[in-house]
Amino acid sequence: MTTELQRDLDDIVRVSRALGGDPSLVLHGGGNTSIKTTGIDVTGAPVDLVLVKGSGWDLGTIEAPGFAPLRLDRLAELLSLAELDDVTMVNELRQASLDAAAPTASIEALLHAYLPGKAVLHSHANAIVALTNSGLSDAEIVAVLGERVLVLPYVMPGFPLARLIADSDVSGVDAVVLRNHGLFTFADAADTALSRHRELVALADTHLGVSTWGNPGGTAPASGTVTELATLRRDVSRAAGTPMLVRQTGSARGAEFAARPGVAELTRRGTATPEHVIHTKRTPMIGRDVEAYAAEYRAYFERHAARANPAVSPLHPAPRVVLDPGLGLLVTGATTKELKIAGDIALHTLDVIDAADAIGTYGSLSEADSFDIEYWTLEQLKLAGKQAKPLGGEVAVVTGAASGIGRAIAELLLAQGAAVVGIDLNAAVTTLSDSDSWRGVTGDVSAPETIEAAVETAVREFGGVDMVVVAAGIFPPSQALAELDDEVWDRAFRVNVTAVARLFRAVHPVLALAPNGGRVVLVSTKNVAAPGPGVAAYSASKTAAAQLARVAALEWAADGIRVNQVEPDAVFDTAIWTPELLAARAANYGLSVEEYRTRNLLRTEVRSRTVAEAVVAFCERFPATTGAHLSVDGGNDRVI
Ligand SMILES: [Zn+2]
């Protein structure tokens, strides 16, 4: 790599991150950047290049490998064409790369190649789209932003937009405003292009009288019952044909907007910038009538289907953003990442709408133009590339999640795509994972307020509860019946049985609304079938819990809820089993620690992970099984 190329690459990475790090300019993968430079090809000959942001990279976190080095002369040849379809263009962009392993360049690569400055920056800055979406004329926009700005009408991104700019006179300007889309700035240095970008956005901010964008405006009081929210999620999931997460954002700003009398008219006018349609659909759902929203979406698809590639099938008709006067701003998604993206875009869009309406009348792309983006072959290909996880869109509550078997279960559920709420007495449960799909609730599992907090968290953060795993339990010290301590007995029953009954009672109304049917798994024990001397409180309480689960299987089958049990034995990779305790117990039986660990028919060690796999299997599979017991004990002749 030449030193010039290295320096230019460093510059564009740094400036791209600065641009992408400001959410009022760039949100979730929006925007793109480039820098023109010189490289050396394999023959040693110098070659003029444009390093263009690769598709799939986020500007805020982009690194050097995120840029594709494209041959400028080849891109200039492509721009001599009058037309070029998307698939052919992408093929040509890949062939124009000096590095076959580089990412596919942004679909705006031809535009970056054409614009005169060394560095080119593109964003969908809120202030700029608010200005163009307010109905101001081109001349009025120039009056706000200055003479060195060219304003162009909306055309489809990709080749048509590159063609339009190549046919326009960009001499004497260093910025292009694309109506209903965004801003390009270009200069001989990346930093100059960035400061020009910020300067224009600041001028627009001042004209609009806006200083911050996308602010959630504090927290609105929790509204609606958990049953109302879980019902909404069930309806959204039914319309989508797959389980979906729903999050009540709790944004005071969202709640205020949702409660406005004319909210339907305000939001019917479309997205702030074309790309947002992929994440939020063209309009939010107002209220909770998912079937009506879905019917409207299907009609919209039918109205425009002739414009789409015939191979394209309709996307699911469920809303991604919901504005309800009672529930505030809610978002839906197959993953928590989708929730985050939809939520951020929704809050920014509300501000763009208000800012544009304050100086004129908000307007966006026509329905047809918006459809063209939503069903654009290139966007559809991106969506098709996403692989759904087995428990994606589903929500689990796990008790005893901070350590041992409960923790192994929680981690495996997360890995399989579920959103998980963990309950534990140990506050470490709140930091078990930094994923947005994880929430921890600290408290005694037998306390009704702990259970209520967990259900509230699951429903308000993720939309409902699909799976409940009871892994919390206590193993009291061994006591002969003759010496049985009342307190030990009571505590074993409180944690091992009463807590489970309370959890079942509290979660049932929500579990019955699980779109794919609720699943409950009780982590039971070998002791139910094969009790041992000295563990009366443990064996009796766990047997009562097992009976409780059997009753739940009988009562809840009508609601489509399956209740099954996993019966582990001698799981030693948990916090309770310190090396000292293991050694002491092994010595007690005259065995080595190794022999003690594998004291079962298969001579295998039973690990937390193995138990977790059995629990998750009951959650993912066996749709025709309820009331079943599965031993995970290495084989025990007293059970067999
Ligand atoms: Zn764009």
Image (cartoon, grey):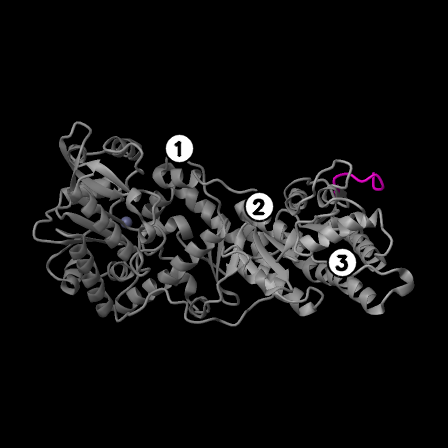
Q: Nearer the viewer, residue 469 or 519?
A: 469
Q: Is residue 636 magenta?
A: yes
Image quadrant where residue 465 sits: bottom right
Give the residue pinned by disc 1: 310
Residue at the top extreme, as displayed:
43
Per the model, the C-alpha gap separating discs 2 and 3 is 31 Å
Residue 376 at least partly seen:
no
Which comes before the other along the chain, label 1 or label 2? 1
Relative to 310, is 517 above or below?
Answer: below
Residue 272 point in image, percent of width and height: 32, 56
Which amino acid, mark 1? Pro
Which amino acid, mark 3? Phe
Span of residues in magenta = 631-640
Per the model, the C-alpha gap separating discs 1 and 3 is 62 Å
Residue 415 point in image, percent of width and height: 55, 46
Which amino acid, mark 2? Leu
Instruction: Please give the count of numbered marks on the rendered protein.
Output: 3
Looking at the image, is mark 1 or mark 2 nearer the viewer?
2
Per the model, the C-alpha gap separating discs 1 and 2 is 31 Å
Give the residue pinned by disc 2: 391
Which comes before the other along the chain, label 2 or label 3? 2
Report the quarter where the N terminus lies: top left
For mark 3, give the secondary structure. Answer: loop
For mark 1, give the secondary structure. Answer: loop
Residue 241 point in image, percent of width and height: 55, 44
Looking at the image, is mark 2 or mark 3 nearer the viewer?
3
Give the residue pinned by disc 3: 475
Residue at the right extreme, as displayed:
482
423 relative to 250 in the view: left or right: right
Residue 165 at least partly seen:
yes
| Label 2 crowd (10 A; few <14 / some 14-19 / many >=20) | many
